[in-house]
Image (tube, rainbow, N blue to C red):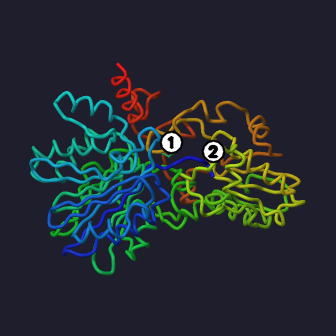
């Protein structure tokens, strides 16, 4: 219930013969809808000819049967679900982006954030490039297309482009004959591939999308790796592998990914249960019941309960029919909005000392409302435990933690935070335990930038303007008003 958002999920499919690639793409993207609900798109390649459709909205609102029928069959496809900023939430910025160049067409979709988009765009514009969107995917596509002019193959062009593109980018792209999956040198966002029982290869942000199309997981794409799917089979290009330490976003385990996914070899559910257990190991609170904030606080609450011996119960119910984009018909207070989404189970919490487990605290305002819900339902004490360390830094790699001042941990001491949220006690996951979420035996390397302000990859030169899209929109409106 952090209120943070991932920015996108990707899906790609390769078949040797023409078949229904649109149906599996729909189901795969549907499984990834939690990674982006504001827009979506698909491109289908039919014998080298691209058919594409994208729009704002959820997958089942955009890809109605008539649209699916128009996309038809093909032998490859790439698709995308998007979370965008409100400023740039328009159809043109939805992905995949299709560019046509003198050596063919290119369709690209990615998850992450390119931190040097501004420099790349200015360089390309100075050379005469004209952009139709404010999306950094278009800039990436343009870089690859330009490299393609001087390369023997699309994969060679992609490999050259990776020397120029900085940041986090788990990407699927498609030429008229090849599907290519690549991950930035740090592997900040997840990406994996598998094979369906009928032989098609599928690439996805998370394994839950492979499950949705009945595909067997083969492996994760490695940080820096380029994997090429073509009629000649599968080829791995490792020129960029091992150049940087692997640094998966640890928040994928804590919040972003679906609990039924396995990311870089670790079950997301297990990682969350472990986080809850770590919290309980260092705790000595006396309580009657452990409850989790749906959805991502549930697994950690189970872990806390198992470790502490305090019974777990379902103390908060989430209304499943309220999406992220739900707009109340009239002006509502924050409390009313949270109440639309969550309700306390008074039979579980009334008269009880409650341990409340959530995945994060950003500003503290939503947590305060949840705590009040519990107190109104009769909880006598509320002890909040958070399955992540406190946020102190921005995220530059594809999520919307983009303002340090708004983070409660930067404004308040632990006691002040407990007071703001209205709890009897407050505890966070130790930084030292974060490295053990995937594996208790050995520490793994992750990106923990928003908890430590130490970032594994480049960050934008102008830290205050991390969102090129926002800046570009501002530039356009300034130009128009002159
Ligand atoms: S800064 Fe935080 S949210 Fe962003 S990639 Fe790193 S761990 Fe994930």
Looking at the image, residue 296 sits to the left or right of residue 75; the answer is right
- Label 1 CB sits under 8 Å from any ligand 1 atom: no
Residue 356 percent across, percent down from the top left: 75, 55
Using a 10 Å C-alpha cutoff, classify the residue at mark 1 as few (fewer than 14 neighbours), some (14 to 19) or many (20 or more): some
Residue 322 percent across, percent down from the top left: 60, 58
Instruction: Report the front residue among 64 and 342.
Output: 64
Looking at the image, residue 41 sits to the left or right of residue 208; the answer is left
Residue 138 percent across, percent down from the top left: 28, 43
Which residue does the image show at 76% across and 67% down from the upper left?
Answer: 313
Which residue does the image show at 63% across and 56% down from the upper left?
Answer: 275
Which residue does the image show at 22% across and 41% down from the upper left?
Answer: 143
Please determine whether, in this image, residue 382 is positioned above or below residue 289.
above
Instruction: Report the front residue among 424 and 67.
Output: 67
**Marks 1,2: beta carbons within 8 A:** no
Which image quadrant for residue 77?
bottom left
Which image quadrant for residue 132?
top left
Label 1 vs 2, first from the N-terminus: 2
Instruction: Report the front residue among 182 and 431.
Output: 182
Circle 1 SS class: loop
Mark 1–mark 2 Cα distance, whole angstroms, equals 17 Å
The residue that disc 1 covers is 400
Please determine whether, in this image, residue 87 is positioned above or below residue 39.
above
Q: Residue furthest bottom?
A: 197
The residue that disc 2 covers is 389
């Amino acid at each position: 219930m952090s209120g943070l958002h991932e920015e996108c999920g990707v899906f790609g499919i390769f078949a040797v013969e023409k078949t229904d690639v649109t149906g599996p793409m729909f189901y795969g993207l549907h499984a990834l809808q939690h990674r982006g609900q504001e827009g979506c798109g698909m491109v289908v390649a039919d014998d080298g000819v691209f058919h594409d459709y994208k729009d704002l909205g959820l997958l089942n609102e955009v890809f109605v049967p008539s649209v699916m029928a128009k996309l038809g069959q093909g032998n490859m496809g790439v698709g995308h679900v998007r979370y965008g900023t409100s400023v740039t939430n328009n159809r043109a910025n939805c992905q995949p982006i299709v560019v046509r160049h003198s050596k063919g067409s290119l369709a690209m979709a990615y998850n992450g954030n390119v931190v040097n988009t501004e420099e790349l765009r200015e360089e390309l514009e100075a050379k005469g490039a004209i952009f139709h969107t404010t999306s950094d995917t278009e800039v990436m596509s343009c870089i690859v297309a330009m490299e393609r002019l001087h390369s023997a193959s699309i994969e060679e062009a992609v490999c050259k482009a990776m020397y120029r593109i900085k940041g986090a980018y788990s990407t699927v792209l498609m030429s008229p004959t090849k599907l290519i999956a690549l991950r930035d040198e740090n592997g900040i966002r997840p990406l994996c591939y598998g094979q369906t029982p009928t032989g098609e290869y599928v690439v996805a942000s998370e394994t839950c999308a492979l499950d949705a199309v009945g595909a067997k997981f083969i492996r994760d794409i490695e940080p820096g790796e380029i994997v090429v799917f073509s009629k000649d089979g599968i080829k791995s290009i490792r020129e960029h592998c091992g150049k940087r330490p692997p640094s998966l976003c640890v928040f994928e385990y804590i919040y972003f990914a679906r609990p039924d996914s396995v990311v870089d070899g670790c079950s997301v559910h297990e990682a969350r249960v472990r986080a809850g257990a770590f919290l309980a190991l260092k705790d000595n609170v006396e309580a009657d019941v452990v409850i989790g904030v749906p959805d991502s606080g549930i697994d950690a609450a189970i872990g806390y309960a198992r470790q502490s011996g305090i019974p777990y119960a379902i103390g908060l119910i989430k209304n499943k029919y309220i999406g992220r984009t739900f707009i109340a018909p009239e002006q509502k207070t924050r409390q009313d909005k949270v109440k639309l989404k969550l309700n306390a189970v008074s039979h579980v919490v009334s008269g009880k000392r409650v341990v409340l487990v959530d995945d994060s605290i950003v500003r503290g305002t939503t947590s305060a409302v949840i705590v009040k819900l519990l107190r109104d339902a009769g909880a006598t004490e509320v002890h909040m435990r958070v399955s992540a360390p406190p946020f102190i830094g921005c995220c530059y790699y594809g999520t919307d933690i983009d303002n340090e001042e708004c983070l409660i941990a930067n404004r308040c001491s632990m006691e002040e935070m407990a007071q703001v949220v209205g709890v009897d006690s407050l505890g966070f996951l130790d930084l030292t335990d974060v490295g053990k979420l995937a594996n208790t035996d050995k520490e793994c390397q992750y990106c923990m930038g928003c908890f430590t302000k130490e970032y594994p990859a480049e960050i934008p030169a102008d830290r205050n303007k991390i969102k090129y899209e926002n800046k570009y929109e501002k530039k356009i409106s300034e130009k128009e008003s002159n």
